[in-house]
Amino acid sequence: MSEIVFEHVTHRYDGDDVLSDVSLRLTERRIGVIGANGSGKSTLARLVNGLVTPTSGRVLVDGLDVARRGREVRRRVGFVFTNPDNQIVMPTVREDVAFSLRRLSLDAADAAARVERALDRFGLTELADRPAHRLSGGQKQLLALAAVLVAEPAVIVADEPTTLLDARNTQLVERHIAELDEQLLLVTHRLEAVESFDRVLVVESGRIVADSRPDSALGVYRSLVG
Amino acid sequence: MSVAQTPAARTRARSSARDLAQIAVFAALIAALTLPGAIPIGIGVPITLQTLGVMLAGAILGARKGALAVTVYVALGLAGLPILSSGAGGLGVLVGPTGGYLLGFILGAFVIGWLAERLTPRLRFWTLLVATSVGGILAVYLVGIPWLAAVTGMPVGAAIAAGSLPFLIGDAIKAIVAALVAAGVHRSWPGLIAEKSWPWRRERAASPADRPASLSTEATTTES
Amino acid sequence: MIGAYRPGSSVLHRLGAGAKLVGLAPSVIVVALLPEWWMLLIALGVALLGFAVAAIPPRAVVVQLVPVLWILLIAAPLNALFSGWESALVMSLRITVCVALAALVTLTTRVSAILDAVRAGLRPFGRRVDSERVGIVLAMTIRAVPLMAEIVRAVLDARRARGAEGSLRAVAVPVVVRSLQTADAMGEALVARGFDD
């Protein structure tokens, strides 16, 4: 497992603290982050791969300072966004998965084999030559997952990956996420999704208000939303 | 932008990815606006808004990114995607009588962006209207009409008539709309266009004629 | 988006995109220099023969030519008025042949093949143009066209639902703002996916 460390991290945006003085050491395999909209949970996720950098404090992934060595960190940490439409940058399914490998200087046969494996893992083989915009919302999110996984990151950060999906696609995507072997940091507001996780953080107004096994953390969250 | 103190290297990488995305998205926006009948306007005649998209690219993204967005749009159209006006696409458009307008669009977006960069931060409707009219109409016709005259062998006077009259009213409306829209967008989303200064506002100490154009920005920041 | 390309297996289909693009330029110049109408008529015959060899259905040819050639309806009479009917005929034929030759390339070449050829052609200019990034921008644009069309449609629908049709400005400001937001999100995704140089 990778070690994700927050050292007194504060992130300020437009003069407001989005996160204030957060210190954490995350080594569990499956970590859930829950909280209301605007609580800072999405910023917490973005800090882990350097899409957002701390205003003060440090974030370290396996000892690498995210603000200084973002590129190396992003090679270890894959990121799944809420809206797959913005994450998919290539016209067709296969091209988009292959796009993730362009920085890894693999030979063509190796790269192609990895792309096919990733497509197969998420049931996208049949759709490989389809334009991305013809996919359903759930298929798009699976494509986003495949495109992240093909680069073989050690950690996957997913920022509300099912929020824009209908109930059926939510289940489909959550099932695939539950089957991941990689270390996972899942930001969500669906309590069911993190019930079996190893650790759950509850974020409220930029602070961690609960950090424990799921049952007690979820209890805190339920009392918060009342 | 965030006030976070990000290391310079990362900020640059970030903005270049963002630039790339803005160029692609605006090229795609011009294509989407050009799809036939994309937007029904009040009078019930579906018109394509290709020139509106071109004008917006320059007025929103500035000279370099705006011109690149239009270039990408034109290149994809010439490569055969049916995204040029009236659903045309392919190289035939370029070698045809109206091919000059396509190249004029690139110049037009550049001129609009160039003017907008120098009007910043006073990007109001009236100033932007000057930019969209000069760039979106004058500059476009300046390339399009001589091309039309050369390809068709029409006398220039006839080419001006044939090459501007059918489009002029529509283009004037689009210049107004583009200026209104750009003013609205710049108000709600400040900082899109980096401020530059007029070429004649140079440091007096140096002889202006000898200066490379790229230095003009730093030479004049003291004056603004 | 497949574009105007008509799949096939003719000689013209199999010819490389680069070769066709490089061949088109001098052909257009030669046609532009042909002085007599009968020479142009032969050239038109050659172009039409090309369509036949490539087995392009006549309708597809018409679809390609009409949006470009309609302006001849204005230009030809004007030209005839000033320079006589023979000049108008030569001019009209010349433009038709040029456009037909270009359409022949477009109809027999995949968009992706043309873009690859352009990228390969840019490679010698590596110092000034990063051909790989050019390829990424072109592909991202193709990906973004349906997204932008969707944004335009959604904003129009929202306005219609509120019963406030009309003002183009009230439609276009949200379209542009959403486009900028999409660009920011795509830029962020590019960085997250390992694009940062």
Image (spheres, coloured by chain):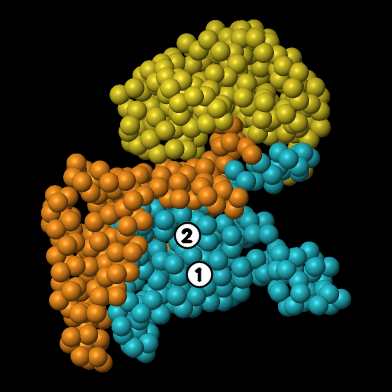
What is the three-letter code of the residue carrying label 2? Val
Q: Residue at x 17, y 62 (%)?
A: C46
Image position of C111 (left or right of A180): left
Rendered image: mark on residue C162: none
Question: Which quadrant of the rendered structure holds the N terminus of chain A?
Answer: top right
Please state the horizontal and vertical placement of residue B121, each as a whole percent of the image.
69, 65
Please state the horizontal and vertical placement of residue B38, each as a whole percent of the image.
34, 57
Q: Is residue C179 visible?
A: no
Q: Is residue B167 visible?
A: yes
Cα gap from disc 2 to disc 1, whole angstroms: 9 Å
Chain C representation colour: orange
Judge whether A218 appears above or below C130 on screen. Answer: above
- The kind of secondary structure element at disc 1 is helix
Q: Residue at x 77, y 39 (%)?
A: B7
What is the three-letter code of the residue carrying label 1? Gly
- The kind of secondary structure element at disc 2 is helix
Q: Residue at x 29, y 73 (%)?
A: C32
Give the chain letter for cyan.
B
Question: Which quadrant of the rendered structure holds the C terminus of chain A?
Answer: top right
Circles 2 and 1: CB atoms closer than 8 Å: yes
Residue that label 1 marks: B108
- Which of the two residues, C83 or A164, is positioned nearer the viewer here? C83
Image position of C156 (left or right of B25): left
In which chain is the residue bearing label 2?
B
Judge whether B23 appears above or below B54 on screen. Answer: above
In which chain is the residue bearing label 1?
B
Please state the horizontal and vertical placement of residue A162, each as a whole percent of the image.
47, 25
Residue that label 2 marks: B70
Chain A representation colour: yellow
**Quarter of the view holding residue C116:** top left
Earlier along the polypeptide chain: callout 2 or callout 1? 2
- Which of the two residues, B69 or A30, is positioned nearer the viewer here? B69
